Amino acid sequence: MIRKVFSLPHEFHLLIVDDGSPDGTAIIVKDLQNVYPGLFILERKGKLGLGTAYIDGFKWAIAHQYDYIFEMDADFSHNPDDLTKLRGACVEGADMSVGSRYVKGVNVVNWPMSRVLMSYFASVYVRFITGVDIADFTAGFVCYKRKVLETINLDKIKFVGYAFQIEMKYTAVKHGFNVVEVPIIFTDRTAGSSKMSRGIFKEAVWGVIQMKINSIFRKYPEGD
């Protein structure tokens, strides 16, 4: 993944957030930093959750004044070639561009039908509860303009599992930002396993209702 990102025509920098992986991730990244000056690593102690990893990565990118800040999985389920498409959408006017599996049909490869249906109808459910028309609410391949992440109070983002993706998109919309979906093809990982659990599923189902209720009593300043 690192070599692929740095081979792209447009220059991207890459931050790896590592929660003490026992597979030697940190050692490999540090070795490659000698080859790629734009490669960085943020090491954390223990498994602190997907959502907090994104938040810490976002705060790092804001502190380093990046104009466009991305999140993506590093298992090639998200195609690095699509980074250019997501950036292009933000250059052309989007405040947040989402690599969407469902904005033009269903573009998922190697998932069992049960997983496709669960993912697809999760977004249908979120649209029903929130009233926000985003086809792929749970997508984890996103480009933000820095002002979006500076406006959102990241310390108030409560979800830590896959519902984190829902909360970030919903909050961006509530702040008045322009969220644009960019069609991508999602290819499931060929190695490793999903971190989906009953707790994460429960968070997504009941958390969305609580998020909607809380938003009624919360003020969302317009983004610049």
Image (tube, rainbow, N blue to C red):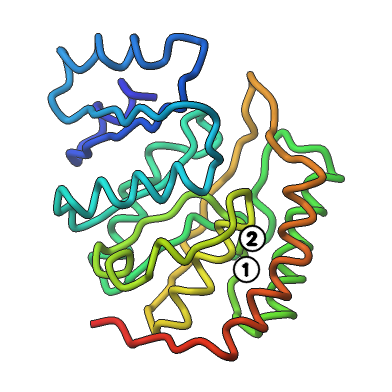
Residue type, mark 2 in image = Tyr
Where does the N terminus fall, quadrant-wise? top left
Q: Residue furthest front?
A: 45
In the rendered image, the vertical position of residue 84 relative to residue 38, given as above or below: below
* Tag shown at residue 224: none
In the picture of the structure, the residue carrying the numbered disc 2 is 102
Q: Residues within 10 Å of mark 1 (few under 14, many from 20)?
A: many
Mark earlier in primary sequence (1, 2): 2
Q: Residues within 10 Å of mark 2 (few under 14, many from 20)?
A: many
Determine the residue positioned at 67% across, 83% down.
213
Q: Locate residue 119: give its quadrant.
A: bottom right
Q: Position of residue 20 (x, y in %)?
A: 46, 20
In-image side of 1 versus 110 (left or right): left
Say which element carries label 1.
loop
Where does the C terminus fall, quadrant-wise? bottom left
Determine the residue positioned at 34% across, 10% down.
28
Determine the residue positioned at 39% across, 32% down.
17
In-image side of 197 versus 46 (left or right): right
* Tag shown at residue 135: 1
Say which element carries label 2.
loop
Q: Position of residue 71 (x, y in %)?
A: 41, 47
Determine the residue positioned at 67% across, 45% down.
108
Q: Position of residue 172 (x, y in %)?
A: 43, 74
Cβ atoms at labels 1 and 2 below 8 Å apart: yes
